[in-house]
Image: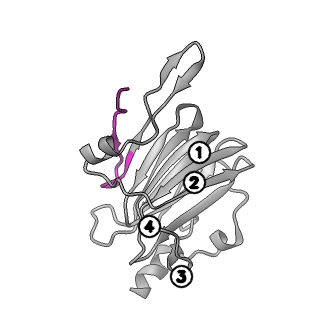
C-alpha cells in the first residue's frame, strides 16, 4: 500500500496528509498511521493515548487547546466522519510564525489527517453535523497542565468560516494570547 504524500503546513513541524485507499468492489481500506512512514519523515511514532471526539452540530467550535510542560504533546488527528475547519496557532515564542494561525479543511470521506507538533494550540469548527475525530497523543492527558488560548482573540484573528456556535464554557473563557505572554 502506498504511503500518502505529506504536505507541510505554514507552521513549522505541522503536516497534512490524506491516506491512500485501496479500493475494490467491496469498498476501501486505508492505513491511517504507520510508524515507518512517520519515522521516515522524522516525526513522532510514540503514541501513549488515543481519544475519540464526536460533535453533533455544524458550526460548533472546540479549542484552542494544548498541554504545558512537562506534558506538552504532539497530536495526530484524523477526521473519520463529517468535515471540519481545523486550526493551528503557533505558541512557540522563538518561532518565526509565533502568534500566527493556519487552517486546513479535513474530510472524513478521505480520512484527512493533521500532525500537530508541541507548542501549537489546536481547535476546529465543524462544517457538517455529526463529526467524528480520532486523536493520538504523545503524552497522556494531565488536567493540571491543560491550557488554551481564546478562539476569538482579535490579535490572532482566526476567520471561522461559519457563525460560531456550541462553544463550551471552558473554551469561551480561555485567555487571549496577550494574557499568556504577560504570565511568562
Characterize the local packing of mark 3: few (<14), some (14-19) or many (20 or more) Cα atoms within 10 angstroms: few
Which residue matches tag 3?
144
Please say if the residues under marks 4 and 3 sit with CB atoms less than 8 Å apart.
Answer: no
Is residue 161 among the parts visible in the rendering?
no
Quarter of the image that includes the C terminus: bottom left
- Between circles 4 and 3, the one closer to the viewer is 4
Please say if the residues under marks 1 and 3 sit with CB atoms less than 8 Å apart.
Answer: no
Which residue matches tag 4?
139
- What residue is at 52 percent from the left and 41 percent from the top? 105
Which residue matches tag 2?
124
Classify 101 as above or below 105.
below
Which residue matches tag 1?
84
Is residue 172 among the parts visible in the rendering?
yes
Point out residue 104 in the picture as x, y percentages from the top left corner. Answer: 48, 44
Characterize the local packing of mark 1: few (<14), some (14-19) or many (20 or more) Cα atoms within 10 angstroms: many
Characterize the local packing of mark 2: few (<14), some (14-19) or many (20 or more) Cα atoms within 10 angstroms: many
Q: Earlier in the sequence, mark 2 or mark 4?
A: 2
Distance in Å between CA atoms under marks 4 and 3: 13 Å
* Magenta portion: prevailing SS class: loop
Distance in Å between CA atoms under marks 4 and 1: 24 Å
126 relative to 76 in the view: left or right? right
Q: Secondary structure at mark 4?
A: loop
In the image shown, does 143 or 106 lie closer to the viewer? Answer: 143
- Between circles 3 and 2, the one closer to the viewer is 3
Q: Residues in magenta? A: 1-15
Q: Earlier in the sequence, mark 4 or mark 1?
A: 1
What is the quadrant of residue 173 in the picture?
Answer: bottom right
Q: Earlier in the sequence, mark 1 or mark 2?
A: 1
Residue 46 inside the magenta-drawn segment? no
- What residue is at 47 percent from the left and 72 percent from the top? 67
Amino acid at each position: 500500500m502506498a504511503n500518502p504524500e505529506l504536505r507541510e503546513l505554514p507552521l513549522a513541524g505541522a503536516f497534512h496528509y490524506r491516506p491512500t485507499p485501496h479500493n475494490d468492489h467491496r469498498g476501501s481500506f486505508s492505513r491511517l498511521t504507520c510508524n515507518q512512514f512517520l519515522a521516515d519523515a522524522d516525526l513522532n511514532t510514540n503514541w501513549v493515548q488515543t481519544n475519540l471526539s464526536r460533535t453533533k452540530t455544524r458550526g460548533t467550535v472546540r479549542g484552542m487547546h494544548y498541554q504545558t510542560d512537562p506534558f506538552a504533546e504532539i497530536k495526530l488527528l484524523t477526521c473519520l466522519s463529517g468535515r471540519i475547519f481545523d486550526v493551528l496557532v503557533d505558541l512557540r515564542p522563538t518561532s518565526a510564525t509565533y502568534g500566527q494561525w493556519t487552517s486546513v479543511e479535513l474530510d472524513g470521506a478521505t480520512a484527512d489527517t493533521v500532525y500537530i507538533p508541541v507548542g501549537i494550540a489546536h481547535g476546529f469548527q465543524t462544517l457538517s453535523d455529526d463529526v467524528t475525530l480520532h486523536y493520538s497523543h504523545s503524552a497522556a492527558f494531565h488536567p493540571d497542565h491543560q491550557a488554551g488560548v481564546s478562539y476569538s482573540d482579535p490579535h490572532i484573528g482566526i476567520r471561522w468560516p461559519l457563525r460560531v456556535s456550541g462553544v463550551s464554557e471552558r473554551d469561551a473563557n480561555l485567555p487571549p494570547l496577550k494574557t499568556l505572554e504577560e504570565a511568562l
